[in-house]
Image: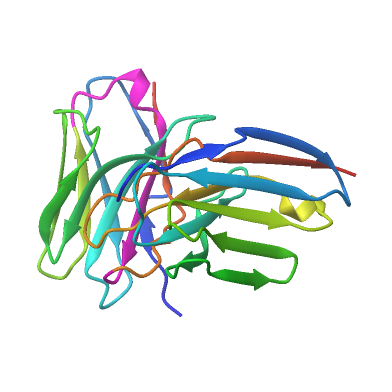
C-alpha cells in the first residue's frame, strides 16, 4: 500500500540558504501535518492543512512557510536557515479522525 | 487536539519485566491515539481508543481508556528488546494539530 512519501530524505544546506521539503500524502487523505523533531526531542507540530487549506498552526518560525497544492502534495519552505533548524522533518497524513501515517522524514543539516 | 500529559518520561526495564505508561488530561477527550517511535524512526500508529472504559489488546500490549475519558494507559507484558522506543499518546481532532507530548522512552536491557 502507498505510504506518505517525503523528499529528499537527506539535505545539507548552509546557513542563510533556503530549503524546500516535499510531502506526498496517502491518496484520499484530507489532512497533512508537518513536524520538526530535534535530537532527543519530541515531534513539534509546525502546521497542518485540511483539504488544502491551512487548518492549524504551531511553533512554525516566520522564516518557514508551507502550502498544499491542488494535487494534495505539500511543501515546506524554509528560508534564512539557521544552525538550529537542523532536525528531522516529518510529514504525516490522515483521513478525518483516523490515525496519522508518517513519512520517513527529511533529515536537514544546516552547516 | 488537546494536550495530554504522559508519565513516566523514561523507563528502564529488564527484558521480561512489565511496563506501563499513563496519559492524563484535565478535560474529557474525544479519543486517544497511541504511537510508537523507534530510535531513528518515524512515529507509527498503534491504536485509537474512542469509547469510555474501552480496553484493546495487541499481543502483549493492552490499551485502556478511562471511564471518564480523561486518562489512558498502555501496558506491555513481558517486555522484549523490540519494545524499545518512545511511546506517545495524543488526542486527535480532525484537521487540527496532533500534539505530541514528551512521550515515555522505554529502554529494555537483555
> What percent of the width, then of the height, locates residue A27?
29, 77
- When asked about the image quadrant of residue B69, the answer is bottom left
Looking at the image, which is closer to me, A93 or A11?
A93
- When asked about the image quadrant of residue A43, the answer is top left
Counting every numbered tag in the picture gives: 0
> What percent of the width, then of the height, locates residue A110?
37, 25
Q: Is residue A86 above or below residue A32?
A: above
Q: Is residue B59 magenta?
A: no
- Write the start and end of the magenta stretch as one range: A79-96
> What percent of the width, then of the height, locates residue B55?
59, 69
Looking at the image, which is closer to me, A52 or B5?
B5
Q: Is residue A99 above or below residue B24?
A: below
Residue in the image at 33% along x and 72% along y: A26
Q: Is residue A111 left or right of residue B49?
A: left
Looking at the image, which is closer to me, A58 or B104?
B104
Residue in the image at 44% along x and 57% along y: B68
Q: Is residue A111 left or right of residue B34?
A: left
Name the quarter where the C terminus of chain B is drawn: top right
> What percent of the width, then of the height, locates residue B7?
58, 37
Q: Is residue A84 magenta?
A: yes
Looking at the image, which is closer to me, B84 or A74?
B84
Q: Is residue A84 above or below residue B8?
A: above
Kindly give the residue lying farthest to the front in the view shown: B68
Q: Is residue A31 left or right of residue A55?
A: right
Amino acid at each position: 500500500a502507498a505510504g506518505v512519501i517525503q523528499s529528499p530524505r537527506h539535505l545539507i544546506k548552509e546557513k542563510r540558504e533556503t530549503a524546500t521539503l516535499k510531502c506526498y500524502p496517502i491518496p484520499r487523505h484530507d489532512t497533512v501535518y508537518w513536524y520538526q523533531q530535534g535530537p532527543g526531542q519530541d515531534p513539534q507540530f509546525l502546521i497542518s492543512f485540511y483539504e488544502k487549506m491551512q487548518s492549524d498552526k504551531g511553533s512554525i518560525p516566520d522564516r518557514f512557510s508551507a502550502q498544499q497544492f491542488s494535487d494534495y502534495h505539500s511543501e515546506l519552505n524554509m528560508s534564512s536557515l539557521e544552525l538550529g533548524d537542523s532536525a528531522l522533518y516529518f510529514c504525516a497524513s490522515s483521513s478525518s479522525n483516523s490515525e496519522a501515517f508518517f513519512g520517513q522524514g527529511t533529515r536537514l543539516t544546516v552547516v | 487536539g488537546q494536550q495530554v500529559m504522559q508519565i513516566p518520561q523514561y523507563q528502564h526495564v529488564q527484558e521480561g519485566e512489565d511496563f506501563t505508561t499513563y496519559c492524563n488530561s484535565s478535560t474529557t477527550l474525544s479519543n486517544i491515539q497511541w504511537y510508537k517511535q523507534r530510535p531513528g524512526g518515524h512515529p507509527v500508529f498503534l491504536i485509537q481508543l474512542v469509547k469510555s472504559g474501552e480496553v484493546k489488546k495487541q499481543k502483549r500490549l493492552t490499551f485502556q481508556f478511562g471511564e471518564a475519558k480523561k486518562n489512558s494507559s498502555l501496558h506491555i507484558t513481558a517486555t522484549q528488546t523490540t519494545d524499545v522506543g518512545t511511546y506517545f499518546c495524543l488526542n486527535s481532532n480532525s484537521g487540527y494539530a496532533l500534539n505530541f507530548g514528551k512521550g515515555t522512552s522505554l529502554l529494555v536491557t537483555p
